[in-house]
Image (cartoon, helix red, strand yellow):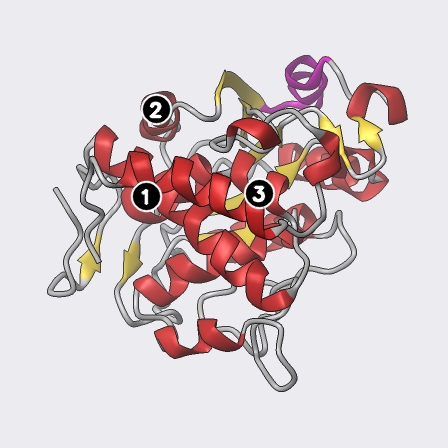
């Protein structure tokens, strides 16, 4: 069921169709290209790999209230891999958290929308990002806060697999299990490539799921570019009062959705030439034309 501007309450488990969610992911990619064109540089491939994750969370899974970014009972979402904020901002604007017009000044002097999200400037951003590796720790705190306040919101944290190189992530993983934060969900966008190259060449983080299991987490491994698999993984989360936090290892393709960017480490950070931009837009628009994305 398409999300219209007339909707206000967006409960968990909304019944968005798979075709709509796949189109929404391509819409995120298309808006990312538009915004990076304004900035002059940006993180295309990292954003493209998690576009389906963002689409399913914001248009199917997260309990939100349209136009009310500070609604106390909303599910929290923390962007560990903050360099993909360019893909998050269109979703927040679309849900009425801030004016659509803000997007036109993305990263410009005086704009609240930076390359990384700032919680003090951007409504709908639950915690800031800059130096990678902090958000899971904050997520543990938010999950514990919900327990203390007897609130039933979940806290979701999106991490990059390169982010797992940060020691603080593992400290947070230990504490989450120790404090029995079953209302915490970590999602690793495992696209296999970081700015410095292949993850396993820089420093091995595999096998991801068994390592987190050893820390006391429940884990599931899925195709992170498959909206059906994502929806099912989120639908199968344990009850919020569970004692065990959940890790979803989402195996994705860096640069997913634009053929010449896929699995190419060179597009982690860059800027499309006029010719390449036209090629990328043509690919995305061809798919989007087949499915109307509700606005």
Q: Which residue in the protein does label 1 denote?
A: 24
149 over 154 or under it: above or below:
below
Q: Secondary structure at mark 2?
A: loop
Tell me the distance, in whole angstroms, between the alpha carbons under discs 3 and 2: 40 Å
283 over 36 or under it: above or below:
above
Tell me the distance, in whole angstroms, between the alpha carbons under discs 2 and 1: 22 Å
Q: Quadrant of the N terminus?
A: top left
Q: Which residue in the protein does label 2 denote?
A: 236
**Mark with earlier residue (3, 1):** 1
Residues drawn in magenta: 207-217
Q: Secondary structure at mark 3?
A: helix
**Mark with earlier residue (2, 1):** 1
Which of the 4 image quadrants contains residue 292? top left
Say few, some or many: other residues with alpha carbon within 10 Å of mark 1 (under 14 / 14 to 19 / 20 or more). many
Give whichever of 176, 228 is nearer the camera.
228
Give whichever of 222, 18 is nearer the camera.
18
Q: Which residue in the protein does label 3 denote?
A: 276
Say few, some or many: other residues with alpha carbon within 10 Å of mark 2 (under 14 / 14 to 19 / 20 or more). few
Membership of 15 in magenta stretch: no
Membership of 208 in magenta stretch: yes
Give whichever of 125, 151 is nearer the camera.
125
**Residue 24 visible somewhere in the drawing:** yes
């Amino acid at each position: 069921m398409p999300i219209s501007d007339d909707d206000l309450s967006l409960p968990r488990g909304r019944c968005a169709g798979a075709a709509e969610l796949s189109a929404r992911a391509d819409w995120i990619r298309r808006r990312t290209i538009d915004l990076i064109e304004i900035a002059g540089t940006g993180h295309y491939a990292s954003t493209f790999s998690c576009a389906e994750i963002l689409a399913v969370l914001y248009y199917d899974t997260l309990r939100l209230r349209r136009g009310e970014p500070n609604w106390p009972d909303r599910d929290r979402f923390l962007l560990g891999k903050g360099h993909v904020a360019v893909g998050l901002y269109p979703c927040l604007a679309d849900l009425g958290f801030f004016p659509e017009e803000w997007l036109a000044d993305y990263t410009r002097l005086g704009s609240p929308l930076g390359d990384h999200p700032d919680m003090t400037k951007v409504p709908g951003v639950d915690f800031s990002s800059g130096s990678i590796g902090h958000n899971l720790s904050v997520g543990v705190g938010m999950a514990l806060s919900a327990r203390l306040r007897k609130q039933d919101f979940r806290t979701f944290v999106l991490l990059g697999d390169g982010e797992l190189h940060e020691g603080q992530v593992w400290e947070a993983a230990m504490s989450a299990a120790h404090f029995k934060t079953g209302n915490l969900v970590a999602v690793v966008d495992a696209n296999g490539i970081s700015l410095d190259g292949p993850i396993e060449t820089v420093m091995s983080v595999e096998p991801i799921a068994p390592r987190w299991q050893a820390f006391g987490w429940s884990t599931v491994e899925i195709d992170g570019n498959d909206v059906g698999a994502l929806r099912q993984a989120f639908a199968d989360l344990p009850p919020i009062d569970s004692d065990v936090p959940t890790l979803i290892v989402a195996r994705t393709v860096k640069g997913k959705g634009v053929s010449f960017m896929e699995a190419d480490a060179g597009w982690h950070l860059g800027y499309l030439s006029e010719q390449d931009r036209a090629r990328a837009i043509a690919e995305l628009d061809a798919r989007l034309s087949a499915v109307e994305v509700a606005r």
